[in-house]
Image: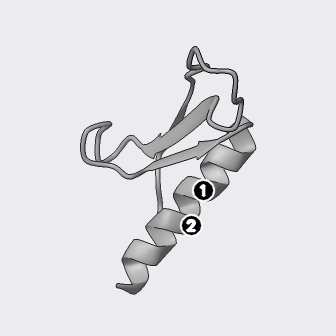
């Protein structure tokens, strides 16, 4: 599986910082890709990769 991962520092206006970063597979496009979320960029990428791996198993 090869992904072109894009990240964004979303920094939503909420006091909880657990979803400041999002990541998605740019090959699928922002509207079609699952999103990974995390407090850091690395956490968001890890979350996305886990979701993509789960999709591949199904």
Quadrant of the image for the C terminus?
A: bottom left
Describe residue 40's horizontal placement relative to residue 12 as left or right.
right
Residue 19 x, y percent position in the rendering: 62, 36
Extreme residue in the front direction: 15
In the rendered structure, find residue 50 and report the number of the disc placed on it: 2
Describe residue 30's horizontal placement relative to residue 39 as left or right.
left
User: Which corner quadrant of the image does residue 10 belong to?
Assistant: top right
Residue 38 x, y percent position in the rendering: 66, 42
Residue found 48% across the figure and 65% down from its top: 51
Looking at the image, can residue 5 be seen?
Answer: no
**Disc 2 vs disc 1: Cβ atoms closer than 8 Å?**
yes
Count neighbours of disc 1 (C-alpha within 10 A) and say few if under 14, some if 14 to 19, many if 20 or more.
many
Residue found 69% across the figure and 30% down from its top: 16
Q: Count the labels in the image.
A: 2
Residue 37 x, y percent position in the rendering: 57, 44
User: Which corner quadrant of the image does residue 12 belong to?
Assistant: top right
Residue 2 x, y percent position in the rendering: 47, 61
Residue corresponding to mark 1: 47
Seen from the viewer's position, the closer of residues 49 and 13 is 13
């Amino acid at each position: 599986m090869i992904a072109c991962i894009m990240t964004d520092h979303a920094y939503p206006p909420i006091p909880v910082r657990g979803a400041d970063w999002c990541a998605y597979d740019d090959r699928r496009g922002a509207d079609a890709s699952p999103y990974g979320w995390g407090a850091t960029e690395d956490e968001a990428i890890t979350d996305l990769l886990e979701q993509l791996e789960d999709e591949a198993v199904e």
